Amino acid sequence: MSDSSLGQVLAEWIESVRVESLPADVVRACADTVIDTVGLSLAARRTDYVAALRDAWTGEGGCTILGWPEKRDAPSAAMINGTAAHGEDFDNTFEGCPLHSGAVVVPALLAAAEAFGLTGQQVLKGLAVGTEIMCRLGLVAQKGVHTAGFHPTGVLGTMAATTGVAAARDLSPKEIMNAWGVAGSMASGLIEYLADGTWTKRMHAGWAAQNGLRAAAMARAGFTGPATVFEGRHGLLHGFAPSVEPDFSIMTGGLDETWWTARMAFKPYACGTMTQPFVDCAIRLANRVNVEDIESLICTVGEGTVHRLWEPLADKRRPLNAYAAKFATPFCVAVGFLRGDAGLAEFTEDCVRNESILGLAQRVGYEIDPEDEYPRNYTGRIRAKLRDGSVIEEYQPHLRGGSRSPMTREELLAKFTANLDYGGLGPVSAEGVARFADGLAGSDGALDLSSLELKG
């Protein structure tokens, strides 16, 4: 890296990016992210937490609330849509640091497009570079943000949304740097929701999305922020990931050559990212053994996942509510074994009180593998000890839907359609939403969300 600040190098790179030069796999990943994120916002449209935000965030404007006829100002729309998209923890993630870019960057850019008349091409550039900055920050931070008690989606997502909106609005490199400097003081997101399954994690994506809109607007108006917000001695990584010795060369190495945006993962299950390989193992085990024959199910885990997904073990075996169950691996394993899935229908208050599921969850435990690849790779291994003394194992070597086993477009559209059904929305064409997303690269006129007809 040159003598320039990290922010200057990145801002100048962002200015140089041209949509027509984006690799095809980056364009495809951005389109898939739009499809997935819109579908998830629609799935959550009738939830109590979305209703609360619709009552609380009431700024007047012309920006779409996905799945509803009313309009809001851009920050309110981004807050509501982002929270809806992340609310069921079914949104895209990243192998390298468990963060959720779609629920942050997509709502911010759709709101910006409607507020400022942006083209599809401007939105696509914002999606590509916003996601790229978030992924690279995640690779630098590794486990550090979670270890410090913060949520990477809220913290790093604020920088991603700011990047996306600033790029889409054609801010200068100096303005982009100021926007990041401002955004660093907006970034937030505690993970104390783990104590009782309350709603604050859900809002982190929406909060980050509206932060990005505000930070970019402030910088465009001349407000200044520190140029060394990323790497400074009081900067983002020092404040939110103090346990990490950051390698900032990851932020600038291979720009234009290596696009992490193309490696986003799309979840097959509506629960915490690192629980998913264990759900796969549980579903396969159910085809091999009877539940009454199981004495114990021992999961081999990475140490960095324990404080969020395994402890306190008694609470993870009997979660307080349906949302807490999504981050309780014993429950996820049990529901996968007994229901053959861990989708939206498996995380309801009825399921979380189901004594058969809870009974099996009591038999699920864990042991730490010091060689586990987390967070570089998300694996699952379950060793089933049976009452006759025999042992059966299942192993899942990676996250399905991730870079090692990507979700096909057909699978993604099937997920989208299922999400519409869950959200109680009338007939909406998954193919139509796909055409909208795929058409961003060729759209040089103001983006029109009304063509999607995504109203209840």
Image (cartoon, rainbow, N blue to C red):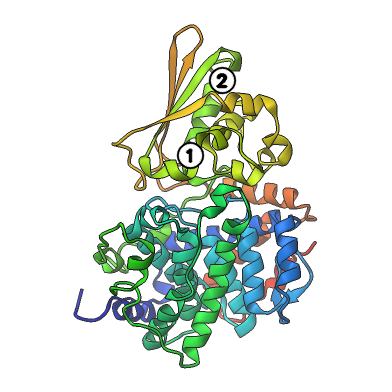
Image depth: mark 2 or mark 1 in front: 1
107 in relation to 419, above or below: below
Identity of the residue drawn at 26% across and 79% down:
5
Q: Residues within 10 Å of mark 1 (few under 14, many from 20)?
A: some
Q: Amino acid at mark 1?
A: Glu
Cα separation between marks 2 and 1: 28 Å
Count of numbered marks = 2
Q: Which x, y percent locates residue 155? A: 46, 65
Q: Position of residue 97 (x, y in %)?
A: 40, 53
Taking depth in this image into account, of 26 and 307 the one nearest to the observer is 307
The amino acid sitting under disc 2 is: Asn
Q: Quadrant of residue 202?
A: bottom right
Give left or right: position of 180 versus 55. Answer: left
Identify the residue under disc 2.
287
**Rendered position, 144 above or below 388:** below
**SS of the residue under disc 1:** loop
- Density class for disc 2 (Cα within 10 Å; few <14, some 14-19, many ≥20) is few
Residue at horizontal 42 percent and vertical 64 percent from the top: 134
Of 223 and 442, nearer the camera is 223
Residue identifier under label 1: 311
- Residue contact between numbered discs 2 and 1, judged by CB atoms under 8 Å: no
Question: Which quadrant of the structure image shows residue 209?
Answer: bottom right
Task: Say whether residue 400 is visible.
Answer: no
Q: Earlier in the sequence, mark 2 or mark 1?
A: 2
- Secondary structure at badge 2 equals loop
377, above or below 120, in the image: above
